Image (spheres, rainbow, N blue to C red):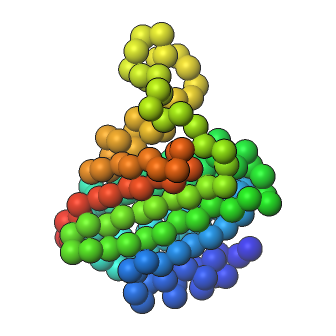
Amino acid sequence: MVWFQILNKIKPLMTAIENQKLTFRSVAENIALVESLVDNICEEFKINEDNYGNILVAVTEAVTNAIQHGNKYDPKKNVEVIVKTKENLLRFVIHDEGSGFDFENLPDPTDPENIEKPHGRGIFAMQHLADNVNLKENGRVVELNFKVCAN
């Protein structure tokens, strides 16, 4: 898909952000759709650079986890991203069709025995980048909340 077509799909979402939804197949290339969505939302709402970086990294990490760990790269399964705004709060809800995971007992990625492990830092990073992270439906739904400041 060419970028022009991707942007045309996303552009209509920018007219009214409240409860907008983007649904796509679980293939890694579709992370670009989410990056464009975050770019457009942050531009539309004039989100400052610090918040933009936190939002982009946290949301793309959640979507990557949904594609990779939740849906196991199964192109028959979808990832859904819902965007909501309310005053100075920007909320992204990421939903996958996987079986979920035990998010109550995640290993601490800062523990010396886990430092060298290649995985296990995504939720930790999201929790430090977003103002609030809620995991629901056995981890199949990730809600990222950001208190945002405009430029």
Residue 141 x, y percent position in the rendering? 51, 54
* Above or below, comparing residue 144 to residue 80 in the picture: above
Specify whether 73 is left or right of 15.
Answer: right
Closer to the camera, 99 or 10? Answer: 99
The x, y position of residue 10, in whole percent, is 55, 79
The x, y position of residue 66, in whole percent, is 60, 50
Residue sitting nearer the eye, 106 or 54: 106
- For the N terminus, the quadrant is bottom right
Measuring 30% from the left and 50% from the top, which residue is drawn there?
A: 132
Q: How many marks?
A: 0
| Up/down of 62 relative to 18, above or below | above
**Outermost residue toward the front in this view:** 137
Looking at the image, residue 139 lies above or below residue 80: above
- Position of 72 with respect to 12 (left or right) is right
| The C terminus: image quadrant | bottom left
Is residue 57 visible to us here?
Answer: no
Left or right placement of residue 125 versus residue 3 in this view = left
Q: Nearer the viewer, residue 151 or 148?
A: 148
Q: Quadrant of residue 85?
A: bottom left
| 142 in relation to 102, above or below | below
Residue at 26%, 74% in the rendered image:
86
Q: Residue furthest top?
A: 113
Task: Left or right? Give the position of 121 relative to 5.
Answer: left
